[in-house]
Amino acid sequence: MNTKPTAVDAYVTRIATIRTKLERLQQLADDHFGHDPDAIHWGHVGDLGRVEAGLGELLAIFDEATRP
């Protein structure tokens, strides 16, 4: 009996993990990432800039992969 996971098994598991993290990110965004909207400062803006850049890099990887 082979109990070694296949690439497909690992892929599906990783997709599930990514979906869970995306859902958590959405929850955090809905709650202003835990910040009081009336107390936002430029440090918060910088933090979100890094998040936005990282998400942009991820999208670029996968958008390129879907192009012919």
Image: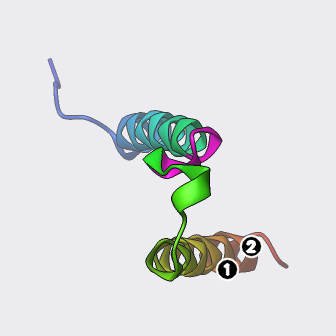
**Residue type, numbered disc 1:** Ala
Is 18 a magenta residue?
A: no
Tell me if mark 2 has few (under 14), some (14-19) or many (20+) residues whose alpha carbon lies within 10 angstroms of its own.
few
User: For this rendering, which residue is in front, 32 or 7?
Assistant: 32
Is 31 a magenta residue?
A: yes
**Residue type, numbered disc 2:** Asp
Q: Is residue 17 above or below residue 33?
A: above
Q: Which mark is residue 32?
A: none
| Quadrant of the snapshot with the C terminus | bottom right
Rendered location of residue 55, percent (x, y)? 58, 70
Part of the protein shown in magenta: 29-33
* Marks 2/1: CA–CA distance: 5 Å
Which quadrant holds residue 34? top left
- The residue identified by callout 2 is 63
Rendered location of residue 26, percent (x, y)? 60, 41
User: For this rendering, which residue is in front, 24 or 36?
Assistant: 36
Secondary structure found at label 2: helix
Tags 2 and 1 touching, CB below 8 Å: yes
Q: Residue at x 47, y 34 (%)?
A: 20
Q: Is residue 25 above or below residue 53?
A: above
Rendered location of residue 37, percent (x, y)? 60, 53
Q: Which mark is residue 60?
A: 1
Looking at the rendered structure, the number of numbered marks drawn on it comes to: 2
| Quadrant of the snapshot with the N terminus | top left
Taking the view exactly as shown, the residue that stands out farthest to the right is 68
| Most common SS among magenta residues | helix
